[in-house]
């Protein structure tokens, strides 16, 4: 029989405690702090309303009946959709009927609607509803007093827009998500830097970003690069909080190659903004060059991705939140002092 001495037992106990501490540290390092516990957030699942299907079921014979149904089901949104989304004159106009019939019978638009039917199944929308509801729960976790969307409305906009938020509803223009090689985008001569994001995978991040932009409008009157940089840094940080397990490439609408470039040259990119006080630039041409979408940021390099000031802003905000652990996401979004965020971020890549 083996007899363990008290000294041996104490040593084993000591090593066991050290082992537990190491394991605990490893797990805490790997834990995504944005992946919060939303199990206690009570929220009704969002409802999908298929305006695209409802509108394209209309024809000359059933027009009056279907029109009444659309008006009752979608309320004021239906009339606003006709006017603002597909640029018709609305329900009260004398040309309402021929205009709507012309739209749903247009050859290209009708073909796009057929594409949608092939690409998007009921199972897809079930999954989208579940994922969107989880995002809204995370929003509710961070912003408990703010109202949240109740519906997802899908529609065909005639390639006029991809996302919107109206009347507590998240609006998706499905004709803008037919896949990056869809012939309609070539027909419209849309550039590849745009069409590469016209895929299913981008719907949820784009939808959440469009919603966040309505909730946290950049109304800051000081039109300097630092204000734009920090505002969008906050926006993308909030988007990441709603989608904590989503790839950075989808959060930011960059390719993997573009993300790798930014990671590799982060120090040099920060150096570009830090030198000559560029963050305090207020020349609108320069601001557009560093914040607008495009194939690249010409001011830096043809290899440098577009919207690079926004990406740098995201990194600054990440550093700010890391170094100011008592600041909540709500605190961050309500903080309008861009200089304060920059200073307290201690951002040094």
Image: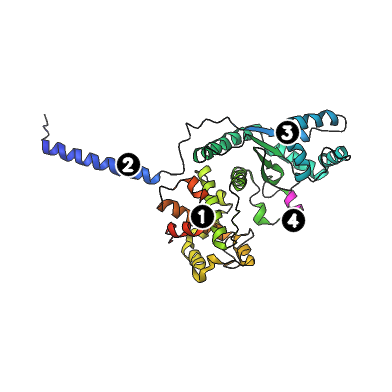
- For the C terminus, the image quarter is bottom left
> Where does residue 103 sit, x and y in percent of width and height?
82, 42
- For the N terminus, the image quarter is top left
Crowdedness of circle 1 by 10 Å Cα count: few (<14), some, many (20+)? many
Q: Can residue 23 be seen in this view?
A: yes
What's the magenta region? Answer: 183-187
Q: Do the residues labelled 3 and 4 touch (CB within 8 Å)?
A: no
Crowdedness of circle 2 by 10 Å Cα count: few (<14), some, many (20+)? few
Numbered circle sitting on residue 314: 1
Crowdedness of circle 3 by 10 Å Cα count: few (<14), some, many (20+)? some
Placement of 252 over or under 126, stated as above or below: below
Q: Residues under labels 1 and 4: Cα distance?
A: 31 Å
Q: Residues under labels 3 and 1: Cα distance?
A: 37 Å
> Where does residue 142 sit, x and y in percent of width and height?
50, 41
The residue tagged 2 is: 24
Q: Between 61 and 40, which is closer to the camera in this rendering?
A: 40
Q: Disc 3 or 1, which lies upstream in sequence?
A: 3
**Secondary structure of residue under mark 2:** helix
């Amino acid at each position: 029989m083996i007899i363990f001495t008290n000294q041996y037992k104490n040593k084993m106990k000591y090593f066991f405690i050290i082992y537990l501490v190491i394991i605990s540290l490893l797990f805490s390092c790997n834990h995504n702090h944005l992946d919060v516990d939303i199990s206690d957030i009570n929220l009704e699942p969002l409802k999908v309303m298929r305006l695209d299907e409802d509108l394209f079921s209309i024809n000359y014979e059933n027009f009056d009946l279907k029109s009444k149904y659309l008006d009752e089901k979608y309320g004021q949104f239906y009339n606003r959709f006709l006017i603002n989304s597909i640029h018709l004159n609305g329900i009260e106009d004398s040309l309402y009927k021929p205009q709507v019939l012309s739209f749903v019978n247009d050859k290209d638009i009708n073909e796009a609607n057929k594409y949608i039917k092939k690409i998007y199944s009921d199972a897809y929308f079930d999954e989208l509803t579940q994922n969107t509801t989880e995002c809204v729960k995370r929003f509710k976790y961070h912003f408990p007093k703010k109202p949240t969307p109740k519906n997802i409305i899908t529609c065909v906009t005639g390639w006029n827009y991809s996302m919107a938020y109206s009347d507590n509803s998240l609006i998706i223009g499905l004709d803008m998500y037919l896949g990056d090689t869809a012939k309609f985008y070539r027909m419209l001569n849309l550039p590849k830097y745009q069409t590469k994001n016209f895929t299913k995978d981008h719907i949820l991040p784009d939808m959440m970003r469009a919603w966040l932009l309505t909730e946290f409008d950049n109304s800051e009157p000081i039109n300097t690069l630092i204000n734009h940089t920090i505002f969008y840094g906050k926006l993308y940080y909030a988007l990441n909080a709603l989608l904590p397990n989503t790839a950075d490439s989808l959060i930011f609408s960059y390719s993997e190659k573009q993300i790798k470039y930014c990671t590799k040259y982060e120090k040099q990119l920060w150096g570009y903004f830090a030198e000559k006080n560029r963050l305090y630039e207020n020349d609108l041409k320069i601001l557009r060059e560093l914040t607008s979408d495009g194939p690249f940021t010409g001011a830096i390099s043809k290899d440098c991705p577009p919207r690079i000031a926004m990406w740098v802003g995201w990194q600054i905000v990440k550093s700010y939140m890391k170094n100011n652990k008592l600041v909540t996401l709500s605190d961050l979004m309500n903080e309008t002092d861009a200089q304060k965020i920059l200073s307290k971020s201690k951002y040094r890549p």
